[in-house]
Amino acid sequence: MATIVLIHPFPVDATFWDPVAGVLRAAGHDVITPNLPGFGGRQLEPDWTMPGEADSLAAQIPAGSVVVGLSMGGYAALALLAAHPDRVGSLVLADTRAAGEAPDGMAGRRDTAASLRANGSAAFLDAFVPKALRPDPAPAVVAQLRQIAEAQPAGAMADATMAIATRDDTDGLLPDIAVPVLVIVGEHDAIIPPSVHTEMAARIPDATLAVIGGAGHLTALEEPEEFSDLLLAHIARS
């Protein structure tokens, strides 16, 4: 059985993974669901970075783990692979990218972080939630996302926004990844579109691409059963 590390996306905490983690545990796997700084009751850590969090994660997980990162979690997973490759026995990159932040994106992230600190998260989430899900999402999924996100401090979201903005560009790492990789993307991902994932998978030597039909950016929230099945199949192949 494998040890599976599920690294959550922005702007939610590790409870995002509860449905998927339940399936994986029922299949006999050990599952670790860390909270990134400020989320899920973890202490705020202003100025945290993806490389710094990679060091923290490396101290929490065994060598050869199956590391799964979705969106922001994917940035942390790639930072972990870059700094601590022994910890990663196989990798799942979902709804994420390897490239660093573009200059215009950096300015936007700074504005978002400043607004979150000054005004809280209500207006931000009103704009974010529709972008993160498929068109005409199920009301229950919208409610679930809002419930998890609204429980997180706006300061955690602001800090994470800057950690995302200042992440390292790991694009050059892709051709040298020596472990099996599963790349997952939602058919309707409006934040990081499928074309980005197709190109990323093509540059990784041992990568499989899976497109989840009818899902947006937060694939594991909208289609947890299909996401879980893909993980189990990936583990069986690895």
Image (spheres, rainbow, N blue to C red):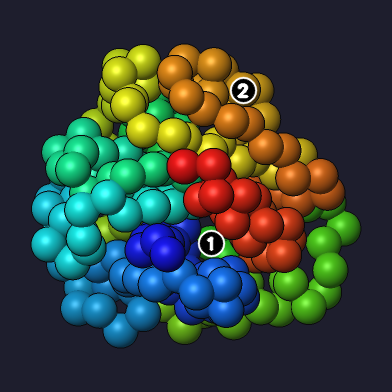
Q: Amino acid at mark 1?
A: Phe
Mark 2, secondary structure of its residue = helix
Q: Position of residue 107 (x, y in %)?
A: 35, 34
The tag earlier along the polypeptide, 2 or 1, is: 1
Residue in the picture at 31% in, 54% down: 65
Q: Which residue: 81% across, 44% down?
A: 213
Instruction: Give the side of residue 176 with respect to residue 202, left or right.
Output: left
Q: Residue at x 12, y 53 (%)?
A: 55
**Three-letter code for the amino acid on which mark 2 is drawn:** Thr
Cβ–Cβ under 8 Å for marks 2 and 1: no
Label 1 crowding class (10 Å Cα cut-off): few <14, some 14-19, many 20+?
Answer: some
Q: Residue furthest right?
A: 136
How far from the left and from the top, in percent, is residue 91? 41, 42
Residue with the mark numbered 2: 198
The answer to which image quadrant residue 2 occupies is bottom left
- Residue that mark 1 sits on: 124
Q: Is residue 7 visible?
A: yes
Q: Is 237 positioned to the left or the right of 210 in the image?
A: left
Tell me: residue 37, above or below residue 176: below
Can residue 162 be seen here? The reply is no
Q: Nearer the viewer, residue 14 or 182?
A: 182
- How far across and how far down the image is residue 97, in percent? 46, 33
In the rendered image, the vertical position of residue 220 relative to residue 166, given as above or below: below
